[in-house]
Structure formats: structure tokens, C-alpha cells
Image: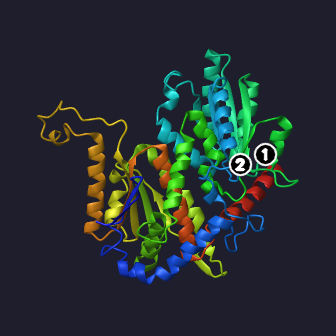
């Protein structure tokens, strides 16, 4: 068994990915000059924020600053004063608002959704106010231009207001530019409809900070209207913003321990300073996934946590990997069309859906499992039907044991057919270990960008469709 274990209890089991089943130690050793150089480049990037050749979408040099987010200090991004302000703002707001709607798309939405799902679970909004410890219902909008979902949400607010005339909604708009179509249109529709229905509502902006004399459209609207403003710092792409105020504000509203979350990211950041690949899970992950694709045709990665509440984590990772590494050109201007295709999955659900293809389909995948060692709310199957032959094997077992056994069976079946997989194991699902895992994944794509010689921090392909969409919408407005 080959695994990297950190003092925190976080482990990365690479037994079925590193060895005879896929990438060999000899391959990793032969590749050492490249990954050692990449590690040095990332270390330099941590200190200076400079990524060679990286430009903003406006074509000007831009620093990469997500490395600084886990570190709470007066000279950093997440300063002690800002964290205290976020927590106090949310505590005060919780006393006067009944619901908070977060309008965001992409990383600005998905990062916060991960925190919500992990901390709150599936039935938060159905729980009585007391069971939520006085905290508001939380809703997500603006992640699609779907009129049905917005109309359904408005219908709910009208029904709530009819029974509670003082019902109050807080709208939190998350957009670095203030022109992102889905969250801005969703907010504009909702705010107008709430006003027309006489439902009390407030607005908060989460956007880029003013730079010199410039400010984003959303920042200007907030200043003119007197809305509170929180920030996604310059040099932090949406897919890396989960450690910024874009997600920390949501965490504060639901009582998620944001300081523990940052502490977990900080612990992983410290662990990954090592140039020993067997001690650095982010570097090892990047090297193995890169070599598996390059040398073994494993160009697809299935990300499969064995926990229903981590489905949003799969979706967040899909964007992180696809947007960071799916690049037409490398830094030298050569057309490489680099990238690994990510597929979200959830165990055991997708063992009844995708696993057939994972097991018998093309030999082009690495399956990445995420498992929990200890569950906070475990349940045992009663012995009600112990006399039934078909049900007796389950009786008396904990559901967590069934989940663990299912994941192990999945990995064994894949390995028998030389289909590689790996396992991230968290001691338990809490803010600290979630911070560890999410930061490791962010850092891993940064490493892989260096290995592939592509810019992991831009998104030129996204800007292409945005130009076409804006032109189409402009033409529609002339009709």
C-alpha cells in the first residue's frame, strides 16, 4: 500500500494509481527534473504572486494571489479585522432577515454551495427557526438564466410573506465585474418583483475592490445605493475564491467555522511546501494525473466522493480542473489543446449509473475517490428482516461501513482490470479537513499548469462565448 499521510490525518492513497497498475516509480523519477522545477516555480509564485506570462482578461499583467488566502494576518488578504467584520455583519443580519439569496455563477456560486451542503445538509431550509439556531434560510440563484427556478423562489417568498408580513429577504450579489449576466439579471428580476410584492428586502454586493480611481459597475451601484460591500480580491479567480469573502460571508451566515476552514487550508499549504514528492500530496497528485494522461491515455478524471453532501464538491472540482487546465495554447504559443476532462460523480449513487462505463468502457480514466473515516451522524441498519436471506447481510451494519465497503469494492474491481484509481481520505467531514482538501486541489492544478506549461489562471475560452453572447443579447434588445 502506498499512501501519503499528513499529521492532521489527511491521507492520499495512491496504491492503485502509482505502481504497476498505471504510473510507475521509474516514470516519476525520470520526470523529476520537470516536477522539481515546477515546485520551485510555485514556491516563487507564492512569494511574489508573479506567474510567467499570466494576463488578466483585459490583457494586462495580473498577479496570482490565492496562495495568500489561508493566511490570516494584517498584511494579508483575509485580515483579522475583515474576518471579525464578516462574522459580526452576519450575526447582526441574522437577527433581522429570514432568508438570504446568493446570486452567483461558476466558482462564485459553487464554492459557497460546498460550504452550505457540508455544514447544513439537505433539509436546512425545512427546519424550524430554532433548529437552525436562529440562522436564516439560504437559497442560491443567478447560477442559470432559468426563469422557472427564479419564479419558484419568488412564489415561495410571497407565500412566506403572506403568513409573516415582516418576512425579510437579503440579496447577496456575487460578481467581480458587476456585469456577469446570470447573477445580475437574476438579482434585477428578484429585486423588482420583491418590491412590487411589498416584501422587505436588502442588498449586499460582493465584488472586486476599487483599484485607484476605477471601480466595478457593481461596486459603483453599491456605493450609490449604500449597500454593504464585500470583496473578491484582485488576482483571485472565481474558481479559487472559496477561501475569500465570496464564500466566507455565506459561511458566516450559516455558522460554518470559517477560521477552521482557513486553518485547514493553511495546514495543507504548509505541508505542500516540501520538495519531497512523497510528503507533498498536491505535487504528487499533479504528477500522477499528468503522467497518467500523457503516458497512459488517462485523459478523463472521474471525481467521486462517497458522501451525498459532497456532490457540490464534485461540481466545484469540475470547474476548477476544466477552466484551469483546458487550454488551446501553452505559454510558448504552441497549440497543444491540453486538458483532462473531469466528470462529477457521487458514491454509491453513481455505482448504479456511471460505474458500468468506468468498468467496461474505454481505458481512458482515473477514478478519484473521496471517503470519510468517521461520520458524525452514523446510523445502523436494524435487524428487522434478519430472517430474510436477501437482507440478512445488511442487518446490524452501520451505513458508514456499507459506504466504505462499496468504495473499496469499486476500487478493487477497477484494479483487477488495470483501471487506476486513488483515494483522498478525510478523518471526518468538518471545516478544517474540507479546507485541507479544497486547497490541495487548488494547489494541485497550479502544479499541473506548470507541468503542462499552460496558464492555469486564465480562461480565454470562456471569454470567446461571452463575446458572442453579449453581441446576441445586444441584437435581441434592438427588436
Horizontally, residue 94 falls left or right of residue 365, namely right
Residue reaching furthest right? 213
> Mark 1 or 2 closer to N-term?
2
Measured as percent of width and height from the top left, residue 149 is found at 60, 38
Seen at 68% across and 33% down, the residue is: 89
Q: Could you tell me which secondary element the residue under label 2 belongs to?
A: loop
Q: In this view of the protein, which residue sits in the foreground, 199 or 20?
A: 20
Horizontally, residue 172 falls left or right of residue 475, namely left
**Does residue 148 appear in the picture of this structure?**
no
In the rendered image, the vertical position of residue 365 relative to residue 30, given as above or below? above
**Does residue 157 appear in the picture of this structure?**
yes
Answer few, some or many: residues within 10 Å of disc 2's Cα (few below 14, many 20 plus, some between 14 and 19): many
Q: Could you tell me which secondary element the residue under label 1 belongs to?
A: helix
Seen at 86% across and 38% down, the residue is: 224
Q: Which mark is residue 12?
A: none
Measured as percent of width and height from the top left, residue 170 is found at 68, 31
In the rendered image, the vertical position of residue 202 relative to residue 474, given as above or below? above
Contact between labelled residues 2 and 1, with CB atoms less than 8 Å apart: yes
Residue reaching furthest front? 74
What is the spatial separation of the Cα atoms under label 1 and label 2, in whole angstroms? 7 Å
Q: Would you name the residue on which mark 2 appears?
A: 175
Seen at 78% across and 58% down, the residue is: 471
Q: Would you name the residue on which mark 1 appears?
A: 218
Q: In this view of the protein, which residue sits in the foreground, 371 or 70?
A: 70
Amino acid at each position: 500500500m502506498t499512501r501519503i499521510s499528513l499529521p492532521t490525518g489527511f491521507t492520499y492513497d495512491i496504491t492503485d494509481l502509482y505502481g504497476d497498475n498505471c504510473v510507475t516509480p521509474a516514470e516519476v523519477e525520470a520526470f523529476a527534473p520537470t516536477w522539481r522545477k515546477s515546485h520551485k516555480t510555485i514556491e516563487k509564485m507564492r512569494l511574489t504572486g508573479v506567474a510567467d506570462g499570466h494576463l488578466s482578461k483585459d490583457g494586462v499583467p495580473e498577479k496570482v494571489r490565492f496562495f495568500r488566502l489561508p493566511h490570516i494576518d494584517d498584511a494579508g488578504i483575509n485580515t483579522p479585522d475583515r474576518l471579525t467584520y464578516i462574522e459580526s455583519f452576519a450575526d447582526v443580519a441574522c437577527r433581522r432577515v429570514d432568508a438570504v439569496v446568493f446570486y452567483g455563477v461558476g466558482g462564485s456560486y459553487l464554492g459557497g454551495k460546498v460550504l452550505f451542503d457540508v455544514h447544513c445538509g439537505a433539509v436546512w431550509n425545512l427546519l424550524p427557526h430554532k433548529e437552525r439556531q436562529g440562522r436564516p434560510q439560504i437559497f442560491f440563484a443567478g447560477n442559470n438564466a432559468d426563469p422557472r427556478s427564479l419564479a419558484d423562489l419568488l412564489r415561495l417568498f410571497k407565500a412566506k410573506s403572506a403568513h409573516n408580513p415582516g418576512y425579510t429577504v437579503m440579496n447577496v450579489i456575487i460578481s467581480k465585474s458587476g456585469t456577469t449576466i446570470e447573477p445580475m439579471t437574476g438579482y434585477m428580476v428578484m429585486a423588482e418583483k420583491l418590491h412590487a410584492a411589498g416584501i422587505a428586502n436588502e442588498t449586499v454586493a460582493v465584488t472586486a475592490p476599487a483599484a485607484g480611481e476605477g471601480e466595478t459597475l457593481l461596486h459603483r451601484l453599491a456605493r450609490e445605493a449604500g449597500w454593504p460591500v464585500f470583496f473578491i480580491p484582485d488576482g483571485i479567480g472565481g474558481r479559487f475564491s472559496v477561501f475569500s469573502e465570496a464564500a466566507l460571508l455565506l459561511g458566516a451566515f450559516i455558522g460554518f467555522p470559517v477560521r477552521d476552514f482557513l486553518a485547514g487550508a493553511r495546514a495543507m499549504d504548509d505541508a505542500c511546501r516540501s520538495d519531497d514528492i512523497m510528503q507533498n500530496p498536491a505535487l504528487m497528485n499533479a504528477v500522477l494525473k499528468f503522467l497518467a494522461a500523457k503516458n497512459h491515455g488517462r485523459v478523463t478524471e472521474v471525481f467521486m466522493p462517497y458522501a451525498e453532501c459532497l456532490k457540490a464538491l464534485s461540481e466545484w472540482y469540475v470547474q476548477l480542473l476544466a477552466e484551469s487546465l483546458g487550454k488551446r495554447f501553452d505559454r510558448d504559443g504552441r497549440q497543444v489543446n491540453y486538458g483532462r476532462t473531469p466528470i462529477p460523480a457521487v458514491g454509491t449513487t453513481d455505482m448504479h449509473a456511471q460505474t458500468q462505463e468506468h468498468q467496461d468502457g474505454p481505458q481512458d480514466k482515473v477514478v478519484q475517490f473521496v471517503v470519510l473515516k468517521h461520520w458524525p451522524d452514523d446510523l445502523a441498519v436494524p435487524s428487522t428482516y434478519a430472517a430474510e436471506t436477501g437482507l440478512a447481510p445488511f442487518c446490524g451494519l452501520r451505513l458508514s461501513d456499507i459506504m466504505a465497503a462499496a468504495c473499496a469494492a469499486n476500487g478493487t474491481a477497477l484494479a483487477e482490470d488495470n483501471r487506476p484509481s486513488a483515494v483522498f481520505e478525510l478523518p471526518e467531514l468538518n471545516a478544517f479537513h474540507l479546507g485541507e482538501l479544497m486547497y490541495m486541489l487548488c494547489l494541485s492544478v497550479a502544479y499541473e499548469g506548470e507541468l503542462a506549461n499552460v496558464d492555469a489562471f486564465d480562461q480565454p475560452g470562456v471569454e470567446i462565448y461571452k463575446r458572442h453572447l453579449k453581441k446576441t443579447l445586444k441584437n435581441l434588445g434592438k427588436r
